Image: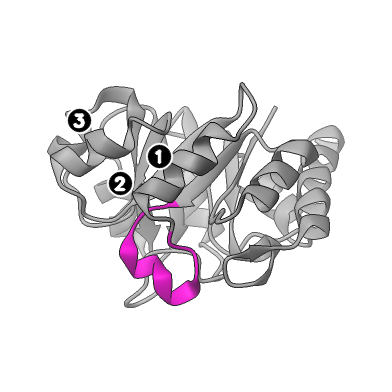
Amino acid sequence: MIRIKICGITSKEDALAACEAGADALGFVVAPEAAKRNRYVPPDRLAELAEALPPYVTRVGVMVNPSRDEVYHVLRWVDRVQLHGEESPEFCQEFGNRVYKAVRLAGEEDVDEAMRYPGECLLADAAVAGERGGTGTTVRYDLAARLAARKRWFILAGGLTPDNIAEAIQAVHPWAVDVSSGVENAPGKKDHDKIRRFIQAVRNAERSG
């Protein structure tokens, strides 16, 4: 079964709606630069949101170029940390399987670079100049598929929506999918109907093979 992460959660209402719709994981962006799209969740707010979630929903903190201490602090409240900056493979390795890297795919060289990161979990997003994710831009499926074939727990992100997720799954065959802007009605505000449609589209795609 393909796992589904709804990212960019900023409110308890959106978090619980995503859980009720069947999300396997929720992402909270604790990188201050996300404030420009109204998706930033400060650490004290992260603790409040994480504690409100039901059991068995994975909590993911999304960070950009954090210090070692900042990662350990956020791991007090979440199950995993997703790193979206220029973190090195050596930095990621220190935290074991509780931390995984998000890479941006623009060309063939990015696939080889991504394979330098430790562990079987990796997320691929679209490469947009000056941006680190949540742009609504679709990742190159051919490059993502190459990584999906080499990483056991490969997560596909980048421009996914209820309307294109079936095509993306067929092209890439990911272990999990990650959506943020594709289920919003405004930056940082989730559209609960789009969340339900997205999750249903993933399940329909699985059944159709």
Which one is nearer the viewer's eye here, 68 or 167?
68
Near mark 1 (Cα within 10 A), the count class, few <14, some 14-19 or many ≥20, is many
Give the total of numbered labels: 3
Which one is nearer the viewer's eye here, 77 or 5?
77
Dot 2 or dot 3: first in sequence order is: 3
Q: CA distance from mark 2 to mark 1?
A: 8 Å
Q: Quadrant of the N terminus?
A: top right
Q: Position of residue 63 (x, y in %)?
A: 32, 51
Secondary structure state at the residue bearing disc 3:
helix
Q: Which residues are magenta?
A: 29-40
Q: Position of residue 180 (x, y in %)?
A: 59, 58
Q: CA distance from mark 3 to mark 1?
A: 13 Å
Mark 2 and 1 residues: CB-CB less than 8 Å, in contact? yes
Q: Residue at x 20, y 30 (%)?
A: 93
Q: Residue at x 75, y 53 (%)?
A: 195
Q: Would you name the residue on which mark 3 appears?
A: 93
Q: Would you name the residue on which mark 1 appears?
A: 122
Q: Considering only vertical position in the picture, is 118 above or below 165?
A: above
Mark 2 and 3 residues: CB-CB less than 8 Å, in contact? no
Q: Quadrant of the C terminus?
A: top right
Find residue 23 and name its label: none
Q: Would you name the residue on which mark 2 appears?
A: 114
Secondary structure state at the residue bearing disc 2:
helix
Amino acid at pointer 2: Ala
Q: Considering only vertical position in the picture, is 17 above or below 86?
A: above
Amino acid at pointer 3: Gln
Near mark 3 (Cα within 10 A), the count class, few <14, some 14-19 or many ≥20, is some
Amino acid at pointer 1: Leu
